[in-house]
Image: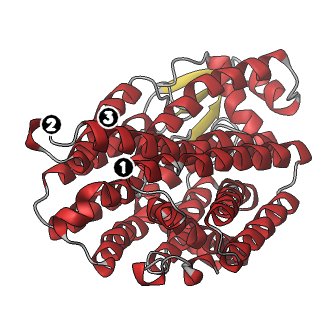
Amino acid sequence: MSTATKISVQKDNTETAEWADGSKHQLDQQEAQRLGVEFDPDSPENKKLVRKLDWRLVPSCWALYLLSNIDRANIGNAKTGGLEEDFRLTSTQYSIIVLVFFTSYIVCEVPSNMILGRVRPSIYLPTLAILWGAAAACQGACQNWHQVVGLRFLIGFFESGFAPGCAFYLSSWYRKYELASRYAWLYTSVAVAGAVSGLLAGVITEYMDGAGGLAGWRWLFIIEGVASCILGVIVMFVMPDYPTSINSKFLTQEERILACNRLAVDGMGLAQGAQERVGEWTALKMTVKDWRTWCLCFLFVMGTGSQTIQYFIPSLVETFGWEGHYAQYMTIPGYGFAVFCILAGCFTADWLKTIWPVLTVMSGSGFVFFVATTAVTNGMVRYVLAIFAFGTIYGCSPLTKTWISHVLSHPSEKRAVAIALINALGNGSSIYGSFLWPDKDSPRFTPGFA
C-alpha cells in the first residue's frame, strides 16, 4: 500500500511527508492531530467522505467483480448450451475443466496481493480484468477440450489477484464496521453474475446459435470476455488509489488526511505516515504463525466447498424437471435469493457490530437446507430447498472475509497476505468440490448436497 514512509516536523508547525510514490506534501500538524483525536463518525465531513467513497470505490470493484464471476462461471452455461455435445465431454473431463481454474487461482493469490501492496490498484486491478477477459473470449475459438483447459488455467491465473485484491483495497479505505455492508454490495455481484449469466446464456445460445457460423456457446464466451476487456479500460480512469496517494484526486487533501486517520482511530490502519512498511515476507511469517488465521481459514473452506454448486446449477435444474433454455432461466431465482441473504446478513452484522451470530445462523441454515434437499424426491420441492441452501451458503463468504479484516487488521501488509492466503486455501476446497457433482449421481447428487 502506498503509505508515507518518512515524517519530519518543521518549525512552522507543518509536516513534510514523503510518500511511497516519491512525492512530498506539507500537512498542517495540528489539523492532522485534530482529525485523528477528535474523529466523529457522525460528523458532516466523515459522512461526506464515506458518500464519496461509496460512489467511487464500490461501483468500480462491483462492476469488475461481476464480470470476473461471469467469465469464471459461464463454463456451466456453455456446457448445457452445446459445448458438452460438440466436444463430447465426459463427466471427468468437465470436472477437470472446472478444476484447472482453481489450480492457478489458488497458487497465485498470495503473490498477487504482495504485488498489490507495491503498485497502484487503479492500474493493477483493471489490467487483470483486461487479461482474463481476453483469455475468456479466446475460449470461443477452442477446437477441443484440451484448449479449454489451457485457457481456463490462464483465466484462473489472471483472476487470482482480483477477489483478495478488492478485499484488501476496500479495507484500506473503510472502517471495521463499515466493511461488511460494502463487502455485501461487492459480493452481490457474485449472485447477480449467476443470474445474469443464466439470462445471457439463454438469450445468446438461443438467438445467436449459428450466427457467423459459430455455435451459441462460442458467442457466449466471446461476448462476455470482450465486455471484461472494455470495462477494465474504463475503470482505469475511475478507480482511485490508496488514501495516501496524490492520484486520489477526487478527494481534497483534508479528506485524504481524514481517510487515513479514521482508519488509525479504528485500528484498521495507520495515521498519515505514522510508520514504515513491514516487508511482505515478514508479513507472511506473521500471518502463518497467527492461530486465528487457521480458524478463519477453516470457516472459509467450509463455505467455499459448498459454493461449487454454482458450476453445476444448470445441470441440477435439468434434473428438477426443466430442460434446454428453460434450465438456464430457472437458475435466476437462486441467485436472487443469494443477493437477499448477502445484504441481510452483512447489514445486520454492521448494525450489531459483531459477525459471529449472523455467520452462525447463515451457515446453520445452509446445512439444514442442503441435507433436506437429499431427503425429498419431488422435483419442485428439491428446487425450492436448493434455492434456500444456495442463498444461505452464499451469505457466509462476505461475512467471513469481513471477519478476516477485523481480526487480522494490522499491519496492513499482514492484512493483505492474510486475506489472500485464507482466500487461496479456502478456495482449495473447490478442487474436491468440483468432483462432488458427477453425472452418475444424477438426479439425487447425494455427495454434493450432503
**Callout 3 secondary element:** helix
- Observer-nearest of 323 and 88: 323
Horizontal side of 103 relative to 357 (left or right) equals left
Which residue is identified by label 3?
227
- The spot of residue 328 in percent (x, y) is 44, 50
- Counting other residues with Cα less than 10 Å from the Cα at mark 1, is it few (<14), some (14-19), or many (20 or more)? many
The answer to which quarter of the image holds residue 365 is: bottom right
**Which of marks 1 and 2 precedes in the sequence?**
1
Q: Can residue 15 be seen in this view?
A: no
| Amino acid under disc 1 | Asp
Q: Which quadrant is home to the C terminus?
A: bottom right
Q: Distance between the residues labelled 2 and 1?
A: 21 Å
- The spot of residue 68 in percent (x, y) is 41, 47
| Amino acid under disc 2 | Ala
Which residue is identified by label 1?
71
- Observer-nearest of 108 and 258: 108
Q: Residues at badges 1 and 3 in contact (C-beta under 8 Å)? A: no
**Callout 2 secondary element:** helix
Closer to the eye: label 3 or 2 = 2
Q: Residues at badges 2 and 1 in contact (C-beta under 8 Å)? A: no
Which residue is identified by label 2?
211
**Callout 1 secondary element:** helix
- Observer-nearest of 214 and 174: 214
Horizontal side of 254 relative to 16 (left or right) equals right
| Amino acid under disc 3 | Ala
- In the rendered image of this protein, does residue 25 appear above or below residue 199? above
Closer to the eye: label 2 or 1 = 2
User: Which residue is at a point 37% across and 36% down the rendered structure image?
Assistant: 123
Q: Distance between the residues labelled 1 and 3?
A: 10 Å
- Counting other residues with Cα less than 10 Å from the Cα at mark 2, is it few (<14), some (14-19), or many (20 or more)? few
- The spot of residue 324 in percent (x, y) is 38, 54
- In the rendered image of this protein, does residue 104 appear above or below residue 257? below
